Image (cartoon, grey):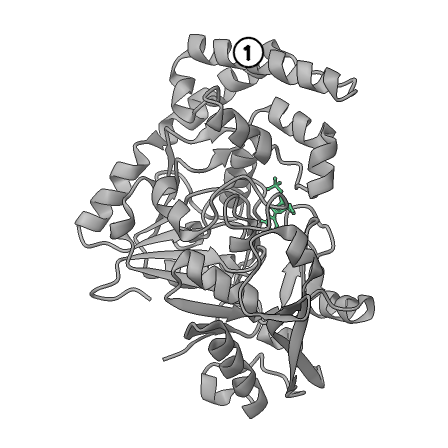
Amino acid sequence: MFGPQTHCVVVVGAQWGDEGKGKVVDALAERADLVVRYQGGANAGHTVDTAGGEFVLHQIPAGILHPGTRCVIGNGVVLDPETLFHEIDALTGRGVRVEGRLVVSDRAHLVLPYHKLLDTESARSRQIGTTSRGIGPAYEDKIGRRGVRVGDLRHDEIVAKLVRAGCERANAMLALSGSAKRCIAADIERGLAQIAPRILPLVGDAGKLVASVLAGGGNVLLEGAQGALLDVDHGTYPFVTSSSTTAGGAATGSGIGPTAIDAVLGVVKAYTTRVGNGPLPTEASPAEAERLRSLGGEFGATTGRPRRCGWFDAVVVRYAARVNGLSGLAVTKLDVLDSLETIPVCTHYRLDGERLDDLPDNVVSLECVQPVYELLPGWRRSTGEARRLEELPDEARRYLERLQESAGVPIRFVGVGTRREQLIAVV
Ligand code: IMP
């Protein structure tokens, strides 16, 4: 993706998350000077399979696995300091140097124990099917202008004031919801005082760093988490996460202007999955979904929950292409379909007898649409060893061509397995 005219690339999920962004970012990071996470938090789980084994990263950008690449946790992220240090320690324990390579934005907000408690105890979170990582409550505090930012850790008295007010508010909400659980401000303040000396040396003006790398002609990769259909504005609201997962969020969440972005790569699976509740028009029958789930190992990297599985939905991907301004697609997990005789692809919907080529703007209608499928022949051969497009079976190439045509975006990469070398660059 990087080239003389392309120095700043965004990688986004173009379905409901779990598209395999970690693998794609890992491949592109080889040529990146800086990799930036710009939204979400420990709800994400980016899995990368390397010769040194499998790594699951929740908050640290997947670029950390390339020794020459520096990483940034941007201002748009809600950072769980506990998980961050577990991740840093686990990486260090496996020989990945993090020190001196990770910068945390002083503007990123902290996920505190009361955010996680509110998320786990809330009936609304259960209805949405959240990851219980405190993401929604932390973004609520950010938008409510009462959040604690990483940079605040430099000032004990500011932290104490914010944490006490936050705890009081959280305890009142817990009481209202009928929960017997409570948080204790003094414990949280003590915890933050302990982590501050460890986190503050990592803290910096992340936006300035990104801008200076770009100004010097370096390559920057902006790594999205979740997917377009989970975007708080453009997703299947209210069954969404609480951040801007789409490419626009990459600018605000990393501290650069949108004109700095040169290309946007959308990652999609060769089929569709979703975790949590909300509409999934192409959800397969229970038996077919079970087959896809076991073939694709479709269990959440963060929560272990079984993912709901279905067929490729071109309506969803066309929509994701529009709201992200996608310049290319990376299609992952093609190999999962290797054994299927025929493969349905949803090209459009029907609603109340009418043809729909575009995603409806509300979940009530989306729950009622009927997907219209085209049945494509399977290839019934292993694709895992293919390293060039020409090495794929004809039917697999035809399948990819149909995805590209129906989504209206050129395919730039195809994933045929979990290993690093199992990613075909389409030239
Ligand atoms: P939250 O982000 O934990 O608030 O969860 C809100 C919705 O987003 C739920 O449906 C989650 O399952 C979904 N979600 C959050 N993070 C991810 C992810 O990384 N992959 C897939 N789904 C996610």
The quadrant of the image that shows the C terminus is: bottom left
Residue 370 x %, y %:
69, 68
Residue 47 image-quadrant placement: bottom right
Considering every residue shown, the one lying at the far right of the view is 287
Residue 248 x %, y %:
38, 48
Residue 31 image-quadrant placement: bottom left
Considering every residue shown, the one lying at the far bottom of the view is 394
- Residue at left 71%, top 30%? 122
Residue topped by disc 1: 165
Counting other residues with Cα less than 10 Å from the Cα at mark 1, is it few (<14), some (14-19), or many (20 or more)? Answer: some
Instruction: Say which of 5 and 188 sits in front.
Output: 5
114 vs 357, left or right, is: right
Q: Is mark 1 within 8 Å of ligand 1?
A: no
The quadrant of the image that shows the N terminus is: bottom left
Residue 211 x %, y %:
24, 44
Label 1 secondary element:
helix
Please tell me whether residue 23 is drawn above or below residue 55 in the rendered image. below
Residue 389 x %, y %:
46, 84
Please tell me whether residue 309 is drawn above or below residue 75 in the rendered image. below
Please tell me whether residue 259 is drawn above or below residue 171 in the rendered image. below
65 vs 111, left or right, is: left
185 vs 305, left or right, is: left
| Amino acid type, mark 1 | Ala
Q: How many marks?
A: 1
Q: Is residue 303 visible?
A: yes
Q: Is residue 422 visible?
A: no
Considering every residue shown, the one lying at the far front of the view is 353
Instruction: Say which of 384 and 151 sits in front.
Output: 151
